[in-house]
Amino acid sequence: MIEFEEVTYGYGGTPLLAEVSLKLAPGSFHFLTGPSGAGKTTLLKLCYGDLIAQQGRVALFGQDARLLSRDDVALTRRRIGVVHQDQKFLDHLSVAENVALPLTVSGRSATDDDIRELIGWVGLENQQFAKPPELSGGERQRAALARAIIMSPEVILADEPTGNVDWDMSLRLLKLMVELNRMGKTIMIATHDLNLIRAAKQQVQARVLRIANHRLQLAGSNL
Amino acid sequence: MIPRPSALLHLLAGDAQADRVVPPTGITARLTTFAAAAMAFLTVFALALSLATGRLADRWGTALAQSSTIRISAPEEQMDAQVLAVMDVLATTPGIRDARVLTDDEQRALLEPWFGPDLPLDTLPVPRLIEVLETEEGYDSAGLRARLAGEAPGAVLDDHTRWREPLVRAADRLRALGLISIGLIATTTAVIITLAASAALAANEQVIRVLRLVGARDAYIARAFVRRFTLRALAGAALGAAFGMAAIWLLPDADPTGGFLTGLGFQGGEWLLPLLIPPLAALVAFAATRRAALATLKERS
């Protein structure tokens, strides 16, 4: 689904990621870990075409990301749900409208009941008419997760989804991710929270990747 | 960039949900509407000016081109003989439809603006005037002058060329200036709307980023902005054109003695022309905003 071959990317001439190779198989569950500034967010951005590899090749659903037009990138993003570290919403729209935004921009429709059901699944049924600035950190993360999965994407990428929430909420978000993986979705979560990874390993077969010294390493099954 | 008809139709059909993705912007919206209204108002006047000068050029051209004047200056005792000689020459000149000697009353009326109503024509050495009306084909003025010189030495032919040409030229230039003004107004409208659209795009950078992250194509994002600006321009131009038409309608009626200014207006079917201004303004806004939006989105990709 997403494949990296010897990918290098850096800022201002300094490589952040060097010769990274990676393959996200359908239905797999990956954690991406490493210290702050190691390049986790950059790697995720390469996964959804927000950045283009400076060297090497990134293939998104079999297509070289470098050769994708802007329209192709837009279409690819409809197949990849992204939960960002700093959740960005359209603050003038309600939570329900924000959650339905991927459907709106792709010209597809969903019934109000479908959207309500999804919002209920992430536990925001009472906030569906609220505006994003009225939500707490955890509520924003859950709203972002609902928005990321409303198109039923094949891949879900989450960048520090538990960064701003308490432990109970972290477990709740993790449970939602595990459920999605059991539905066949490919998941990759970037986090530096080792407790979250340990908790996940009790529920799902997950590979843990670590970025260290600009390179991607397999952290092993026993963390 | 010429907008495709399908793109325009898609735009006008609208999408209520898509319209909401861009937050409302108060001041930009009002400025765009006001600018479109002001430009449409000015366009109505430029159009009226252009049409009026066009009519004037036609009138001057036609009226003066079809007539000439022969002025006879001769001693009192030769005057009648020369008048008769000129009339004989005119009667045998091809291209002359009619010719007649102006009466004393008519000559007095012509001179009245300068000398007052009690001018004693019979005691003054005033030349006799002959009005000549020509056929569609016209006459050979050089040939007529030569014959007049032989038959009536005191006769001078004035075919109005030296009056007519500068007047028609001036009217034609005024008409061209009116059309140039309309072009400049359309260009200025496009520039204003482009600047407003660019400002709106810059102010909504975060919105654009979110839309891109959830898979919006550039065309979708651009459409959200384009539709808003096109409809604002349409509404503003409709308002401005309506005010402009009302102002023209309130101008004094054209009358023969009123001259050019009272003829500044629309006649008959010309009143339909200002109705084209709002859709044309919308078209200009559509093209300008679409171009600005797509360029900005490309720049930020």
Image: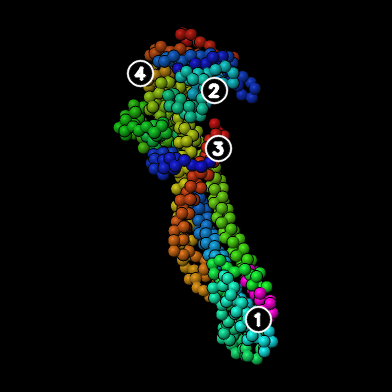
On residue A66, the disc is 2
Q: Amino acid at mark 4?
A: Met
Q: Amino acid at mark 1?
A: Ile
Distance (Cα) linking label 1 and label 2: 92 Å
Q: Amino acid at mark 2?
A: Arg
Q: Is residue B60 visible?
A: no
Quadrant (top left, top right, bottom left, bottom right) of the C terminus of chain B: top right
The answer to whether the residue labelled 3 contacts the one labelled 1, judged by CB atoms less than 8 Å apart, is no
The answer to whether the residue labelled 4 contacts the one labelled 2, judged by CB atoms less than 8 Å apart, is no
Q: Quadrant of residue B199?
A: top right
Q: Does residue A27 lie above or below B6 as drawn?
A: above
Protein chain holding label 3: B
On residue B72, the disc is 1
Q: Position of residue B51 (x, y in %)?
A: 52, 62
Q: Does residue A163 lie above or below B62 as drawn?
A: above
Residue lying at 51% horizontally and 42% vertically, measured from the top left: B2
Magenta highlight range: B147-163
Q: Position of residue A131 (x, y in %)?
A: 41, 37
Q: Earlier in the sequence, mark 3 or mark 1?
A: 1
Q: Are marks 1 and 4 on the same chain?
A: no
Q: Tell me if A204 is positioned left or right of B45 in this view.
A: left
Protein chain holding label 1: B
- Under tag 1, what secondary structure? strand
Location of mark 4 (residue):
A183
* Local crowd size for mark 4, using a 10 Å CA cut-off: few (<14), some (14–19), many (≥20): few
The verdict on residue B167 being magenta is no
Q: Is residue B119 visible?
A: yes
Q: Does residue A157 lie above or below B146 as drawn?
A: above
Q: Amino acid at mark 3?
A: Ala
* Local crowd size for mark 3, using a 10 Å CA cut-off: few (<14), some (14–19), many (≥20): some
